[in-house]
Amino acid sequence: MELNETQKSVVDVLYKTYKSDTVTRSQINDLVKSKKIANPSWLKSDKYKVGRGVYKLPMGDDEVATEIVDTQKSESQAAYVVSSLTDNVVPAKDKDFVTFGNFADVKNVITSKKFYPIFITGLSGNGKTLAVTQACAVAKREMIRVNITIETDEDDLLGGYRLRDGQTVWQNGPVIEAMERGAVLLLDEIDLASNKIMCLQPILEGSGIYVKKINKFVQPKHGFNVIATANTKGQGSDDGKFIGTNVLNEAFLERFPITFEQQYPAAKTEQKIVATKLKSAGKSDDKFATNLVTWADVIRKTFKDGGVDEIISTRRLVHIAEAYAIFKSKMKAIEVCTNRFDDSTKTSFVDLYTKVDSGASAESILADKKAAEEAEILSEEKQDSNDSEEDEDTFEV
């Protein structure tokens, strides 16, 4: 179909604006909203569709977009560049979210739209990722989350060639997407990464990055920022509590101006979190929420003293609240949510909750535990002394 003058004008504006012979639905809508073009419903048809929400501009052979990649194309090169995201990626607000810890500070940085990388460290399940997500939701900022593993490499982060509809195309990775959209990039579990993550060095400096595979230099749009979360401070886990975490390059860590240490919420705040979740699930029970928090507090203090190898996180308390709403039984909810631990740990945790439920306070439980440990030590010392005396008698005979 030959284009009329109006349609040619639309194609010309789209190409000059985005410097690409493919455009996304959101890009078209942006120009329509700004009244730069009339809504081209004819373009958003199957005839020009080359991917989900992606359309090929109908251009003549003499108008091929040589500005996209200023190199001679070979069969192995992408026919066109496509976005990996076509829709709005502002996180949804969680009606049950309770603010605590570093939330206000994180929100202030995100709201400022300044480039100021943040490193957030803390034990598992204490709300690091949720805080960033909800801060973006409140600030109405787009956020792109990347779950880092030891296998994560440049192709996963910056993008790579993909086969789509029989054609080889370049698809932007999450980092490039976040840069071009001016979004918040969340690097979750960054301490699981290998040295392949070093490709992000120039990006963490606030400058653009040259994507050599498509011969393109990408500059970050205003509002772009990087936030990383980790269970460690990037120095590995000597105690073995977080298997798989790695020692990150010092130069990489130095590019994060600030580090927030996320702690578990205070007892009153955690009670509110659990109580809110119980109420939302239709099982409002403030006493159960209080008991769960007391139970978790005892376990965490014992964990800190080296008495147990596992811990009950805020996230696991929320899981228990949700399980209670499903199974209608408090003890079953606790049991199924502690099944992930070894039998000995699970049994001790369940027994401990029984004590809390019977009315014992955290202080009395810890005091009893300390007394039992001291009695056990005295018993062992006495046994060692008796064994020593028997050895001496045997030697004299």
Image (cartoon, rainbow, N blue to C red):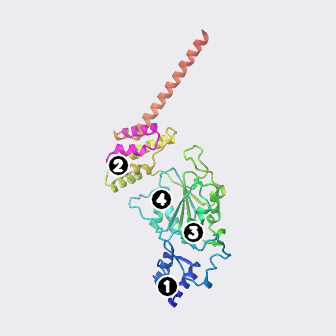
- Label 1 neighbour load within 10 Å: few <14, some 14-19, many 20+: some
Mark 1–mark 2 CB contact (< 8 Å): no
Q: Is 329 one of the magenta-colored residues?
A: yes
Horizontal and vertical percent for residue 185?
Answer: 54, 64
What whole-number distance in Å separates the C-alpha atoms at marks 3 and 2?
44 Å
- State the SS at label 1: loop
First reached walking from the N terminus: tag 1 or tag 4 = 1
- State the SS at label 3: strand
| Above-or-below relation of 6 to 139 | below
Residues rendered magenta in the picture: 327-354
Tag 1: amino acid? Ile
What whole-number distance in Å separates the C-alpha atoms at marks 1 and 2?
55 Å
Q: Nearer the viewer, residue 156 or 235?
A: 156
For disc 3, the marked residue is: 171
The circle drawn on residue 37 is 1
Q: Quadrant of the C terminus?
A: top right
For disc 4, the marked residue is: 131
Identify which residue is drawn at 44% across, 44% down: 297
For disc 2, the marked residue is: 324
- State the SS at label 4: helix
Tag 2: amino acid? Tyr
Does the rendering let one see residue 380? yes
First reached walking from the N terminus: tag 3 or tag 4 = 4
Identify which residue is drawn at 37% across, 46% down: 333
What whole-number distance in Å separates the C-alpha atoms at marks 1 and 4?
39 Å
Tag 4: amino acid? Ala
First reached walking from the N terminus: tag 2 or tag 4 = 4
The residue mark sitting in front, 2 or 4, is 2
- State the SS at label 2: helix
Q: Residue furthest right?
A: 72
Residue 360 shown left or right of residue 51 in the figure:
left
